[in-house]
Amino acid sequence: MPTVRHGRPAWRVRLSAGLLSVLAWGCATPHPLAYTPAVPEAARRGSMAVAVRPIASPSGASPQLGGKVGKGSATGQGATTGAATGAMAGLLTSLQTGPFFVLLAPILVPAGALVGGAGGAAVGYAHGIPRKEAEAAQALLARNQADLSAELAQRVARRLPGLGKVQASPGVAPDLRIDVSALSWGLYGGAGAQPVADFELTVGYGVLDGKGAMLLFRQFTVGGPRRPLQAWAAEDGRLLRQAVERAVDEAAEAVCDATFLIQDFHLSGDLPPLTCGLLPLRPGPMFLAAPPFRGALPKVEDCSPVLRWEAFPRQQDLDHDQGGVCRRIGEVCYDLRIWVSVGGGPGDLVYERTGLHLEPRADPAEASPPEGEPRRPARPAAEHRVEAVLAPATEYLWSVRARFTLDGVARATRWSMNQSPDVRAQTTAQRWFRMEPLPPRGPCLYDGIPPLRHHRFRTP
């Protein structure tokens, strides 16, 4: 029998200590992809001929509709699952009573099944989609499918000249090849009596050198507005067609950026960090961003707000510089985008500025702390007053990134965003217990901005 220390088995103490050591090592160790481009630097420099090829979606790929179709079937499935879970909980509880198991099991098991079945039925009903709305949405998705892979390839090719590349001539071996495929698409959500869903598109792409060797293979998801299913079906699906167009264009930009522009720098060791990219300072990140409260909406002072974010290179980039990368950076500027929020997802792009040359200054919040608090080192910040009048009492989404030269070649950081999705799109259980896994490549290495993860604010 294992020895016990302070009431705990020794193996548990050793396991806990081991886990804490691993976490501490992970927080202190830079991510292995820090300070590296996605595609090897030598393969993406200079003017080159690039071939873009659409790859057909995998066999059986079809538009997706999140949620269970049919309120009745969803309720029944939820009741069955809940009853089984409740009965098992009752059985396990009875086993803990030792000799009283024989007496308590006949009471606790049926009671657990009853309570679990009722709760499961309620959850199933909430997540079921009325059949009429589901059939209309599925028909629209199929009609808007067209050939997303071919359209995506065309849009990637159209962006090549802006990156200093040319499209390879037919029959001529390219210097670089990009294969793209629309893996899945659809409306996700669908909970409640009035189902609300956001459009999402998942893309896979590969970058190959002139000899056909794979340099990079990834997949990512971009999202659009979040609307009731009835709104998606209105006007013969006009809004859905717009969402498809915008998602394909955003995906094409993300593929080109990852292939030719993105340069990763120091990646936070937080598990996981609350924000990715340049930290928003005014308005700041979402208040009480940890579960279950994350999601409170920051407000700005007027309808032409001043937006402030940490300057690039960030202090953590300078502190963890590997190989003197930061010393080779020049011509820093910023790209800023603001979208109107539609259910927490990006609607129309209402404001965009590219190549903003902004002198870094000390963030006032850091330079002048509240009375009684210690003065912290001033954080260099960049700020920009929106040169337009936004609508009052309206929610907006925004993101910013740095553009710069590295050894004289144009590069960019990833777009800033929240690590967690909009809390309003999550169930109560998801708010309390984080169930989304860390991305396999580590936190903050997303291509594009995943669905419902933009920074946001509300005008007065």
Image: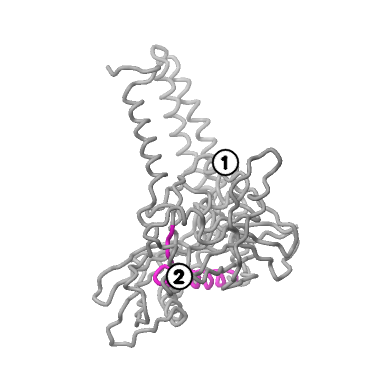
The residue where tag 2 is placed is 411
Residue 259 is tagged as none
> Does residue 360 lie above or below 157 as drawn?
above
Foreground tag (2 vs 1): 2
**Amino acid type assigned to the residue bearing label 2 in the image:** Arg
- Determine if the magenta segment contains residue 446: no
Residue 459 horizontal/vertical position (percent): 72, 59
Quadrant showing the C terminus? bottom right
* Display coloring: one colour
State which region is magenta.
239-265
**Amino acid type assigned to the residue bearing label 1 in the image:** Pro
> Relative to the observer, which residue lies in front, 288 or 360?
360
State the separation of the CA atoms marked 2 and 1.
Answer: 37 Å
> Relative to the observer, which residue lies in front, 268 or 201?
268
- Determine if the magenta segment contains residue 248: yes
Q: Main secondary structure of the magenta part?
A: helix
Dot 2 crowding, Cα within 10 Å, few <14, some 14–19, many 20+: many
> Does residue 199 lie above or below 377 as drawn?
below
Tag 1's secondary structure? loop
Residue 422 horizontal/vertical position (percent): 57, 52
> Relative to the observer, which residue lies in front, 337 or 95?
337
> Relative to the observer, which residue lies in front, 157 or 300?
300
Tag 2's secondary structure? strand
- Give the residue furthest to the top: 99
Residue depicted at x 41% and y 76% = 153
Residue depicted at x 37% and y 62% = 36
The residue where tag 1 is placed is 292
Residue 21 horizontal/vertical position (percent): 37, 36
Residue 421 visible at all: yes
Residue depicted at x 53% and y 62% = 312
